[in-house]
Image (cartoon, grey):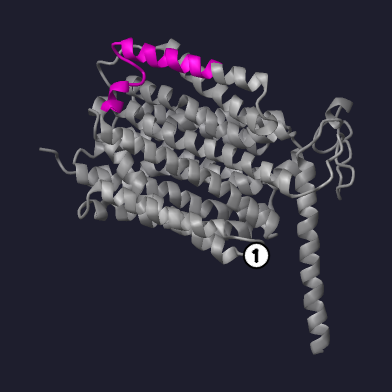
Amino acid sequence: MNVGAGKREWTGLAVLALPTVLLSLDVSVLHLAVPQLAADLMPSSSELLWIVDGYGFLIAGFLITMGTLGDRIGRRKLLMIGSAAFGAASIAAAFAPTPTALIAARSVLGVAGATLMPSTLALISNLFQDARQRRTAIAVWMSAFMGGMVIGPVVGGLLLEHFWWGSVFLLGVPVMVLLLLTAPALLPEHRDEHAGRLDLVSVALSLGTILPIVFSLKETAKHGPQPAGLTALAAGLVLGAVFVRRQRHLADPMLDLRLLRNRAVGVALGVMLIGAVILGGITLLVSQYLQLVAALSAFEAGVLLAPQAVAVVVGSLLAPWLAARFQPGFVLGSGMLVAAAGLLLFSQVRGDGLVLVVVGISLAAFGMGPQGVFCTEMVIGSVPPRRAGAASAMTETIGEFGIAMGIAVFGSIATAVYRDEVALPPLPTARCRSSPGRRRPRRSGSRGGRARRPAERARPRAGCLHQRAARGRHQQRCGRRRDRRHRHGRVA
């Protein structure tokens, strides 16, 4: 008989919720910071894509490795190592002077972030042996993640109103410090005493599978089918087949494929993937719509994004209550129908439909809330505690890869539609000279760093688009102020 969790376990759950808040903060605030970031660092289109997407793809690539590593060296130990690395990389990202430096810092954040999620979820599996308590703990854990998405846009938008774009990365530093101070006292160590050595060949194969496929997706979205993209896709699929074959023949595989023979687990992972793709893509489109179409400030956009995360929190917290009264399949199906209704509302948005946007995405998020809790608990509960890290990594890989894939796919579709439907003249090959507030090359020794070389000045910059969008928002706000002055003058 399973022993119920006590005060220490529930307090430990509060500590484990801290990294999930941090990860969601880092994801949610970056979308709001992109316009300012692009205007300041002026990255190329490919650099901006890696700044936004590279973090999520590296998390997805390393999750299985880190989950398996935690089973071997200890989940609490891996959690603390990853927390320290995440905090240090956050500081480096905040003060990155160039796009390359920011990409490097975001890459470290991705690898460090891959240690946090499987470690926390595996420790929850160890702390809560009772199935009902474990489901409640997972609901709290997921609610903490979405709670970070509630406060992230609001706090991040407020920071962007008063400070530079790098300030949004500093939000995670105090969270990591608090975790490092409290984890040793509240979290017991767990590891698989019988696990073998980490198979480095499997690690290389897992990365060699994910990253080429991601590269192929980006290249095909930007340029259509090209030899480089197709070659990368073929290489990723071949390495993926080799990876699967190797896992089937290893006595202690990095990814236990036998878990997928369980039909419930397979369905759960499929539902999680679909939900993550939709959630990641819709969040990107909504944030861009609010700032570039509705001409809202970063803070105003953050406030309007908060109801979406609140809806997911409510849906997640309802999951344990629903589990006691209905079959999981019924709850999952009903949730997906509710989410589909929300997406249908969102599809009806035209030029001015903020209410419809908020209602649509909130309804979709509410429908996706219970499926995350049910699917995660279904996978975690199907493996022995010693394999909890690898199972946790599997669920997180699906979620993170789905979100990153949603951002890439939905963003590429939106770009293609924009390019085809809006007949704008092409941007010049050099830096956008018609944009207001065009940056001059910095002189050596000036504030902000060295002067740009001619090759750098000749690169087309993604900042041009954001500068044009900023000019449009500025003109809209000036028009609103003129209207208000005109009305006041008439009243006087």
Location of residue 54 with respect to 171 vertically, above or below? above
> Which quadrant would residue 398 be assigned to in this image?
top left
* Nearer to us in this view, 217 or 7: 217
The residue where tag 1 is placed is: 352
Residue at left offset 75%, top offset 50%: 422
Q: Residue furthest bottom?
A: 492
Question: Circle 1 sits in a helix, a strand or a loop, which is it?
Answer: loop
Tag 1: Cα neighbours inside 10 Å, few (<14), some, or many (≥20)? few
Q: Residue furthest left?
A: 1
Q: Which residues are magenta?
A: 235-261
Is residue 236 inside the magenta stretch?
yes
> Where does the image place residue 231, in percent across and percent down from the top left?
61, 17
Location of residue 340 with respect to 211 vertically, above or below? below
Residue at left offset 44%, top offset 41%: 274
Residue 48 visible in rendering: yes
Residue at left offset 86%, top offset 47%: 435
Location of residue 216 with respect to 8 vertically, above or below? above
Left or right: residue 101 versus residue 331 is: right
Q: For the stretch drawn in magenta, what is the main secondary structure?
A: helix
* Nearer to us in this view, 447 or 455: 455
Residue 185 visible in rendering: no
> Where does the image place residue 156, in percent across and percent down from the top left?
59, 51
Left or right: residue 316 versus residue 201 is: left
Amino acid marked by disc 1: Asp
